[in-house]
Image: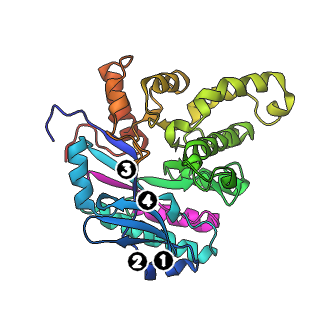
């Protein structure tokens, strides 16, 4: 890439390893995910016998992915497993083996270009002891953080065991990236991708508020690095409503000693909000040091040209654009990429 191309770290990009149907049998589930590779650069993510999503080679082929990164001007991608690969419902020992397999396959993908491809680990959150052990192993093997769902079979992030996991990540200096999955009320959102358009932003808002209103952020170390996908979902748009409720209702203040908006300095969000107006609101709530470029690559609801909203937002100066596109993520994940080149 030439010196004139702005530096970009995409913190929200997914991969799906070339898992076969035999690989998926490890999960002992009729809906286990695997990849049907057509051999022509296209494929389908399968859920058992059912087609889940058509996909293209950059999702599993690092060479094709790097070529796409060249075309989009993306310097580094921090890759995380497609959420359908979360295996929180299976027996804990199976979940631990599955997570280790996904992590080893992620490492193989990143080995093709270990500067430009950095991986987040997968972890079996249904067993926090096993989860802590696996994320520490993954960190030792080069993973730059961990990717988790916003709930574990209905337990929000303020669940004591999940708070214990987050405490471990803080103590072991493992950044956490939270992605929504298995959205609420799917029976009311059967069409129009409403589970993605309504359910996912609501799930992320719920995850953030569960940590704030429960007092979990009061108990967790200040140095925990935790980032929420999709611009934090509905958080920025609704935080004034939450603050108003906190001021007026003691049941909301019960475990939350400070105004909910004051906890915006305890977490980060990605920039996947898709308009200058939305990014303006996000920066007014979060500041510009807690937003990192994220595209949701390579899925169709992601930002088509990674970083284009940051590029074209007139209220940002060049220094701030560089922070959102590159420097904030470099610091959050301790990539050591600033001042170096591939």
Q: Quadrant of residue 211?
A: top right
Q: Which residue is mark 1?
A: 24
| SS category of the residue bearing label 4 | helix
Task: Give, as a single range, the part of the protein colored magenta.
Answer: 114-140
Q: CA distance from mark 3 to mark 1?
A: 24 Å
Answer whether residue 119 is magenta in the image.
yes
Expressed as whole percent of the image width and height from the top left, the position of residue 86 reads 54, 63
Which of the 4 quarters of the picture holds residue 91? bottom right
Marks 4, 2: nearer the viewer = 2
Look at the picture and state if 154 lies above or below 30: above
Sequence order check, earlier mark of 4 and 2: 2
Q: Which residue is mark 2?
A: 20
Q: Are marks 4 and 2 in contact (CB under 8 Å)?
A: no
Q: CA distance from mark 2 to mark 3?
A: 24 Å
The relative height of residue 73 versus residue 114 in the rendered view (above or below) is above
Which residue is labeled 4 in the image?
Answer: 139
Q: Which residue occupies the foreground of this view, 35 or 148?
A: 35
Say if mark 2 contacts mark 3, CB within 8 Å: no
Q: Residues within 10 Å of mark 4 (few under 14, many from 20)?
A: some
Alpha-carbon span between mark 1 and mark 2: 6 Å
Label 3: few (<14), some or many (≥20) within 10 Å? many
Q: Quadrant of residue 125?
A: bottom right
């Amino acid at each position: 890439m030439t010196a004139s191309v702005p530096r970009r770290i995409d913190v929200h990009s997914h991969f799906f390893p070339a898992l076969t149907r035999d690989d998926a049998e490890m999960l002992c589930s009729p809906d286990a995910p695997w990849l049907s590779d057509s051999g022509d650069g296209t494929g389908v993510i399968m859920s058992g016998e059912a087609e889940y999503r058509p996909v293209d080679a950059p999702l599993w082929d690092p060479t094709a992915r790097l070529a796409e990164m060249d075309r989009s001007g993306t310097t580094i991608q921090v890759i995380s497993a497609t959420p359908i690969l979360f295996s929180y419902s299976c027996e804990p020992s199976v979940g631990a083996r599955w997570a280790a397999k996904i992590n080893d396959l992620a490492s193989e993908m990143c080995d093709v270009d270990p500067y430009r491809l950095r991986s987040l680990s997968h972890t079996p959150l249904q067993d926090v002891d096993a989860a802590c052990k696996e994320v520490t192993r993954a960190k030792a093997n080069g993973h730059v953080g961990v990717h988790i769902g916003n709930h574990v079979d209905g337990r929000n992030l303020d669940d004591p065991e999940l708070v214990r996991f987050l405490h471990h990540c803080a103590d072991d200096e493992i950044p956490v990236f939270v992605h929504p999955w298995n959205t609420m009320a799917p029976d009311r959102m059967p069409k129009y991708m409403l589970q993605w358009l309504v359910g996912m932003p609501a799930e992320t808002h719920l995850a953030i508020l569960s940590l704030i209103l429960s007092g979990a952020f009061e108990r967790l170390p200040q140095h925990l690095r935790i980032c929420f996908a999709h611009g934090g979902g509905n958080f920025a748009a609704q935080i004034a409503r939450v603050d108003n409720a906190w001021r007026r209702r003691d049941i909301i203040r019960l475990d939350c000693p400070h105004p909910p908006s004051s906890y915006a300095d305890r977490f980060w969000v990605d920039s996947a909000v898709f308009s200058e107006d939305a990014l303006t609101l996000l920066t007014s709530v979060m500041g510009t040091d807690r937003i990192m470029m994220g595209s949701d690559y390579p899925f169709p609801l992601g930002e088509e040209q990674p970083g284009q909203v940051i590029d074209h937002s007139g209220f940002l100066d060049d220094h701030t654009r560089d922070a959102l596109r590159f420097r904030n993520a470099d610091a959050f994940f301790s990539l050591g990429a600033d001042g170096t080149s591939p």
